[in-house]
Image (spheres, grey):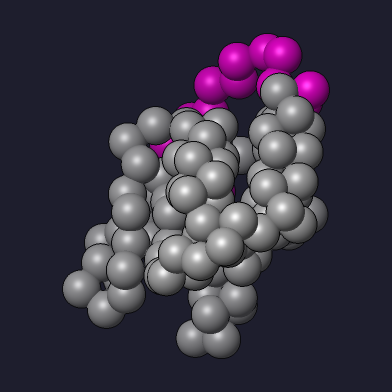
Amino acid sequence: MVITNNDLVNNKYKDLINIKFIDGNYRDVLVFARDKIHEGYELLTHPLSSSVKPNETPFKSLIISDLKGELNLDSVIVIENSIMTYDKFNKVNIRFNEKVIGDFKLIDLTVLESALNI
């Protein structure tokens, strides 16, 4: 399952893979993923992957398992620490112009496709 707030990812893959589109920010993606992980889904990509810090981009796509199982404590620790890191870096609300927003969407899509080997 791909959890994303990137409409570029959603529009490109919504008919091909299981996507949960989050109409919100990077933190909203992390919180949704955390809630799913607490239900027994496993985190398959790191929420802070790539060299782009969470305060440098408004978009995030991550992958969790499609099937629920036993609670995976490693996934819980990683997602909880990722939310704390996001909160630490995001003290100021930064506004980006449309070109920069498009660039961030493309970076996020590229990182996701790398993880999916597409």
Q: Inspect this view and state whether residue 29 appears.
A: no
Query: At which x and y percent is residue 101?
Result: 48, 41
Quadrant in which the N terminus appears: bottom left
Which residue is painted at 79% across and 22% down in the image? 88
Q: Is residue 79 above or below residue 43?
A: above
67 to the left or right of 45: left
Which residue is painted at 43% across and 36% down in the image? 98
Nearer-the-camera pick, 29 or 60:
29
Count up the numbered dots: 0
Quadrant of res 85? top right
Query: At which x and y percent is residue 76?
Result: 68, 48
Nearer-the-camera pick, 9 or 48:
48
Which residue is painted at 60% across and 76% down in the image? 115
Q: Is residue 71 above or below residue 45?
A: above
21 to the left or right of 34: left
Magenta region: 88-104
Query: At which x and y percent is residue 33?
Result: 51, 47
Query: At which x and y percent is residue 83?
Result: 68, 33
Q: Inspect this view and state whether residue 76 appears.
A: yes
Q: Residue furthest left?
A: 15
31 to the left or right of 7: right
Q: Is residue 5 above or below residue 28?
A: below
Nearer-the-camera pick, 57 or 116:
116
